[in-house]
Amino acid sequence: MPSTRNCASDKGGRMPLLEVEGLCVDFRTARGPVRVLDEVGFHLEAGEVLGIVGESGCGKSMTSLSLLQLVPAPGRISGGAIRYGGQDLLALGPARMRDVRGRDIAMIFQEPMTALNPVFTVGQQIVETIVRHRGMGPRAARAEAVALLDAVRIPEPARRVDQYAHELSGGMRQRAMIAMALAGQPKVLIADEPTTALDVTVQAQIFDLLRDLRRQLGTAIILITHNMGAIAELADRVMVMYAGRKIEEGPVDTVLAHPSHPYTRGLLDCVLHVDAARAVHDNAPAPLPEIPGVVPALDQLGAGCAFAPRCTRAASRCGSLPPLFDNGGHLAACWLRESANAAPAAMIGEG
């Protein structure tokens, strides 16, 4: 176990289930390599839910794809370590990595209609995973597929198992994706925007399902979302990303109650509250809060804080990149934290 880490990640000296240190991902372009993930680090304990939050383009999904070595070309993992149970996954070859995917770490992809193969039934795709990772025969694997569809609350699972993706509703497709991800009995489940394009009722059902999976199976979950409400409802800890870097991390109650980075505060201010919704209904709407500007193009980042051009509290010192300041396990990469008696984390500039 390395002596330097971005936060204290083990409990009583116990090794984390998953640990990421100094993860860097570069994409080749005509003008040279562009860094899309810059020294990202975090850990995940068994049975824990880690929320990763940020706007589109902040690096959330690229982080999850990196864990499974699924970074699309022309991208490549250019540095860092990804350890599962103490083993560095980046040292594994393609064949051994295929054993990890689905068996140890599985992923619920963002768009089930494109992630599910349209020419195979839902059941065939689940059975393939069961046979591959659990060694069951076809008959037993099919029975297990029906049981999984039932476990994720798909009605009439014995009939749905023989249907194709286009025959299922959006909520059923998302549940089928969850069943497929669970087919190999993984210890880590990555949920990448699992409620995208679903109505609020179905979203609540998916969140209930993830909560039940964690409680009943002890599954550790990485929840990737832009929805701070989902983070508050499900996560134990939260990591905020911006422009390919980690800019804040800590226990979810602490971060939501006392956000230390202006970007995190901006995300929380943009959450529509009941009073604001009532004002809109009463035809007396107040202006909805927003974060001005957009996430910068990653090939146009300067030397300083990437959020400074959008930050109302930016100062001259923001022209240099702040380290992650650590205040009792609550990390934030903002110069404002320097005055809050927070010490720089061991990995200066990480995230």
Image (cartoon, helix red, strand yellow):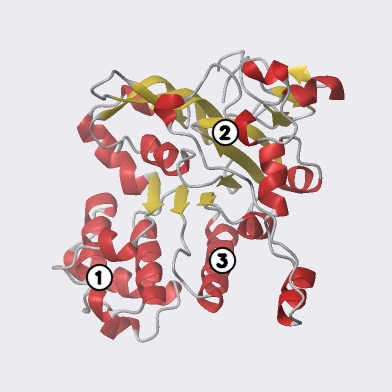
Residue 81 sits above or below residue 122 on the image: above
The residues bearing labels 2 and 3 have C-alpha atoms spaced at a distance of 22 Å
- Location of residue 351 with respect to 171 vertically, above or below: above
Q: Which residue is mark 2?
A: 43
SS state under label 2: strand
Dot 3: element: helix
Q: Amino acid at mark 2?
A: His
Q: Is residue 172 left or right of residue 231?
A: left
| Figure quadrant of the N terminus | top right
Identify residue type, mark 3: Phe
Sequence-first disc among 1 and 3? 1
- Quadrant where the C terminus sits is top right
| Residue drawn at x 71%, y 17% as measured from the top left | 316
Q: Is residue 223 left or right of residue 273?
A: left
The residue depicted at 54 percent of the width and 28 percent of the height is 41
Report which residue position mark 3 lands on.
Answer: 207
The residue labelled by disc 1 is 122
Q: Position of residue 125 (x, y in %)?
A: 22, 63
Q: Residue at x 28, y 58 (%)?
A: 115
Q: Earlier in the sequence, mark 2 or mark 3?
A: 2
